[in-house]
Image (cartoon, rainbow, N blue to C red):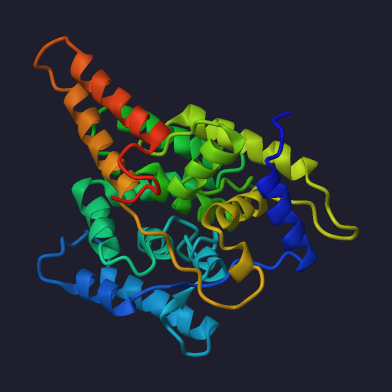
Amino acid sequence: MTTIPDSLTTTYTRWAALDRRPQGTFPWRPGSWANRFSRDDTPQLKGINLGAAIKDIVGATRRAFGGDEDRIDRTVVEGFHSPTMLRDTDGSPSPQAVVTAFIAAMIWGYGTSGYGPYRTVRVLSTDPDAVEHLVEIARIAQEPTQGGHAAFEEIAAQRATGDPYLKYLGPAFGTKFLYFLTAAYDEVETTPVLDAVVRRWFRDEAHETLYTAWWDSDSYARYLGLLDEWRKALPAATGSKALERADVELLIFASARGDAGSWLTGDDPVLPEELGLDELLGAVSGEIDQLATRPRDDSQEGPELLRQLIEWVERDDAVSGNGAL
């Protein structure tokens, strides 16, 4: 078994003493999302009403927070990902509901970032079959014989072909969608988020190298394995539920961000980390995958060197000490 880092044990002890309080809310800007999705230059998706998706999410946040629409939390987002919400009355998948759920997960992830709406539109519009692909990923993630890990591997395999399969959706945000899909359904194992915050914590505290610039199946499998080891090894208080993978990921997030003194003891919104380096690496990685499949010559030296560059930056945070440009 891999030794549990002291920082995780310390955060867990504080969390347990506070009756395992859930994570707080995140701020977001409903107006920015509504405006971006209603602009004339926003690509229209066949059969999908993006404006209605935002209205549904705003309505859910208002109901959850007494009319306050500019906060969102895991519970609200998870509600959009339940199997019943993702299906029409006849039991068939609802593309509108799946896209709404995906947007809700992106809102939760981007928070108040000004470019969250643009990046989400780009994922939905660059891949001409994005809606169908999101529906398929949702199906795999909530299929008891497959689940979130299988959905991750499906995206990784499709992206390796060089096709624009959910292009611009990197694992840092893609695993947010997978997390909510699996957390919302008891018949599958929850597969938590693997993003820049978590990656750096594993590097610094657990001395484990994980990759978030592209869909690396080995990294995600290793990550899930460590979460399973640690959730079973951390002491559970008498009468409390056994720890889940998502509990350990939440503690890692708090430990990495230094938020344990705030969200474990107060009701203040959790401010999302400023994004930068990992978004850049994800974009570069997508271009590398495209370059590697172009039949210009038989050499793979260029793409391989670029992949090594990404690995070096991820390992050493050479661009910036905190991952922001």
Residue lying at 80% horizontally and 57% vertically, measured from the top left: 241
285 displayed left or right of 12: left
Q: Quadrant of residue 278?
A: top left
Horizontal and vertical percent for residue 85?
Answer: 50, 65
Q: Nearer the viewer, residue 89 or 98?
A: 98
Horizontal and vertical percent for residue 263?
Answer: 60, 69
Q: Nearer the viewer, residue 55 or 260?
A: 260
Query: Which residue is outermost to the right?
Result: 238
Q: Is residue 217 above or below residue 73?
A: above
Query: Which residue is outermost to the bottom?
Result: 67
Q: Does residue 31 show up?
A: yes
Residue lying at 52% horizontally and 57% vertically, measured from the top left: 257
Q: Quadrant of residue 237?
A: bottom right
Q: Does residue 169 show up?
A: no
Q: Nearer the viewer, residue 61 or 8?
A: 8
Q: Is residue 206 above or below residue 325?
A: above
Horizontal and vertical percent for residue 151?
Answer: 47, 39
Q: Nearer the viewer, residue 113 or 218?
A: 113
Residue lying at 31% horizontally and 33% vertically, measured from the top left: 159
